[in-house]
């Protein structure tokens, strides 16, 4: 008799499965962007570099990046998101296994006749939902893909932090170089002022020259004060990234490295599998596709098996008596016949979510292509500018010296000297600025290419603080 009931239940399950299969399946995921064979700006088949921080040959910068990877608060928060996603994988996987619950109850009751009685029970219940349609597997796959996305997010945050540290470091170095330039310029202007005042006392100059020279000195004092504040502000920004208190105590040498070697750019197709941000968007898209599969399978019948055994007794001490044993076995089958379109709407909503993430993935992909192309073209333009500014600096410096010599001999007036000084000052600041931009452009290019900043640099990984179980899940999800 029990076998006949079971056969009927399974037959009914098969019928419901056929009816559920009539629900339209969601379209397959198939983003196929058209990729160029080579970069438009130039062809470079060399593989994009790994360990790009070593190309700057700056031990102090490497030490700062190592410190930031260990202490940056935002990066530590990103590591905790990996831990959260790892536990979500555990929860999703647990749904595929049976659950075993134990409950013990005891109480006293009084009947209408005034009799007081005891009632005690102990129950052990086993429940299991076979994953016949794969919806539990889809939920586990979604959780695993989300875990992989969080790992890619962490890697991307590491790369971005290394780029931000490098950018602020070069900014601090150039700010210190400009401060030194302003201090030296102020010293030269003070010497000029003393000479002009001496000539004025001898009746060789007009008072206007004295006023103009004094104005130059005071203007340079103001510029030095402003530049001091810029150095401190940049230092605080860098200290915050390092996880330090922003006290503007970080010192940087007043020099910038000059790198002539052209960086390798690899091929556009390599960017898809190399850049961690693109990988994060792709894994998030796959997770949404798994969630869509789960929403579709939620429209199928649900089957669950249960078994329970327990004891009933008036006395708690008699629960262990074999004569009070109660047991049951059951099979539960359910199928929604009418829900006013709720399950279909959930599936359609998840389909819209997947389509949104698909477009975001494509947008991010082409944004990275654009960033690489811009960095490559800007690199060429900045090199030309640097060459021109170097020549302009040499000419302007020579003109400044000649103008003051001619002024001292009475050949030209002081306004000519002022103009020569302005041109020389602009040329010097332009050289420093473009040199900094060349370095920052290289960082932008490396960042856009998705290459790892790590080389021989030994960096602590905040993910190592996570439980071993989570670490294994991270490894499995990225294979």
Image (spheres, helix red, strand yellow):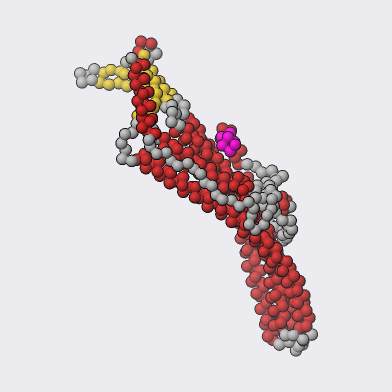
The answer to whether 20 appears left or right of 474 in the picture is left
* Picture quadrant of residue 293: top left
- Vertical comparison of 296 with 360: above or below: above
Name the one closer to the observer, 405 or 243. Answer: 405
Secondary structure character of the magenta stretch overall:
helix
* Picture quadrant of residue 224: bottom right
- Vertical comparison of 247 with 1: above or below: below
Identify the residue shown where x is 65% and y is 47%: 452
Q: Quadrant of the N terminus?
A: top left
Q: Position of residue 303 (x, y in %)?
A: 39, 27
Q: Position of residue 377 (x, y in %)?
A: 65, 60
Q: Position of residue 200 (x, y in %)?
A: 74, 86
Q: Is residue 361 something that shows in the picture?
A: yes
Q: Is residue 80 something that shows in the picture?
A: no
Instruction: Find out whether residue 477 is within the magenta segment.
Output: yes
The extreme left residue here reads 113
- Vertical comparison of 478 with 315: above or below: below
Identify the residue shown where x is 57% and y is 45%: 279
Name the one closer to the observer, 196 or 438. Answer: 438
Give the residues in magenta.
472-479
Name the one closer to the observer, 437 or 18. Answer: 18
The extreme top residue here reads 323
Q: Position of residue 419 (x, y in %)?
A: 69, 79
Identify the residue shown where x is 42% and y is 38%: 25
* Picture quadrant of residue 383: bottom right
């Amino acid at each position: 008799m029990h076998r006949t009931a079971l056969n009927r239940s399974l037959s009914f399950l098969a019928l419901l499965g056929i009816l559920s299969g009539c629900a339209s399946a969601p379209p397959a995921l198939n983003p196929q962007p058209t990729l160029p064979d080579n970069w438009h700006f130039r062809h470079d088949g060399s593989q994009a570099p790994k360990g790009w921080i070593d190309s700057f040959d700056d031990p102090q910068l490497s030490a700062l990046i190592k410190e930031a990877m260990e202490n940056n608060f935002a990066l530590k928060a990103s590591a905790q998101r990996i831990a959260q996603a790892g536990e979500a994988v555990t929860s999703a996987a647990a749904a595929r296994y049976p659950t075993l619950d134990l409950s013990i109850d005891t109480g006293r009751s009084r009947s209408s006749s005034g009799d007081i009685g005891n009632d005690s029970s102990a129950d052990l219940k086993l429940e299991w939902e076979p994953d016949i349609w794969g919806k539990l597997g889809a939920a586990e796959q979604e959780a695993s893909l989300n875990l992989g996305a969080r790992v890619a997010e962490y890697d991307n945050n590491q790369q971005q932090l290394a780029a931000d540290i490098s950018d602020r470091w070069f900014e601090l170095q150039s700010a210190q170089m400009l401060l030194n330039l302003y201090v030296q310029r102020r010293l030269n202007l003070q010497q000029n002022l003393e000479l002009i005042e001496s000539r004025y006392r001898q009746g060789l100059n007009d008072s206007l020259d004295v006023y103009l020279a004094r104005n130059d000195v005071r203007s340079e004092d103001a510029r030095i004060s402003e530049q001091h504040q810029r150095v401190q502000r940049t230092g605080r920004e860098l200290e915050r990234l390092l996880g330090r208190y922003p006290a503007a105590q970080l010192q940087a040498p007043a020099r910038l490295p000059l790198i002539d070697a052209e960086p390798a750019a690899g091929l556009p197709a390599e960017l898809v599998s190399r850049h961690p941000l693109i990988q994060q968007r792709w894994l998030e898209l796959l997770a949404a596709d798994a969630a869509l599969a789960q929403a579709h399978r939620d429209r199928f019948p649900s089957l669950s098996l249960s078994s329970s055994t327990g004891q009933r007794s008036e006395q708690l001490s008699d629960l262990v008596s074999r004569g009070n044993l109660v047991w049951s076995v059951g099979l539960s089958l359910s199928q929604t016949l009418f829900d006013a379109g709720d399950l279909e709407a959930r599936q359609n909503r998840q389909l819209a979510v997947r389509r949104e993430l698909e477009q975001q993935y494509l947008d991010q992909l082409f944004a990275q292509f654009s960033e690489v192309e811009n960095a490559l073209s800007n690199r060429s333009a900045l090199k030309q500018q640097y060459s021109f500014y170097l020549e302009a600096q040499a000419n302007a410096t020579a003109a400044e010296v000649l103008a003051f010599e001619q002024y001292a001999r009475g050949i030209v007036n002081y306004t000519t000297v002022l103009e020569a000084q302005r041109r020389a000052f602009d040329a010097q600041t332009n050289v420093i600025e473009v040199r900094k931009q060349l370095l920052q452009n290289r960082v932008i290019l490396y960042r856009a290419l998705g290459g790892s900043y790590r080389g021989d640099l030994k960096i602590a990984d905040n993910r190592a603080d996570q439980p071993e179980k989570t670490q294994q899940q991270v490894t499995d999800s990225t294979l």
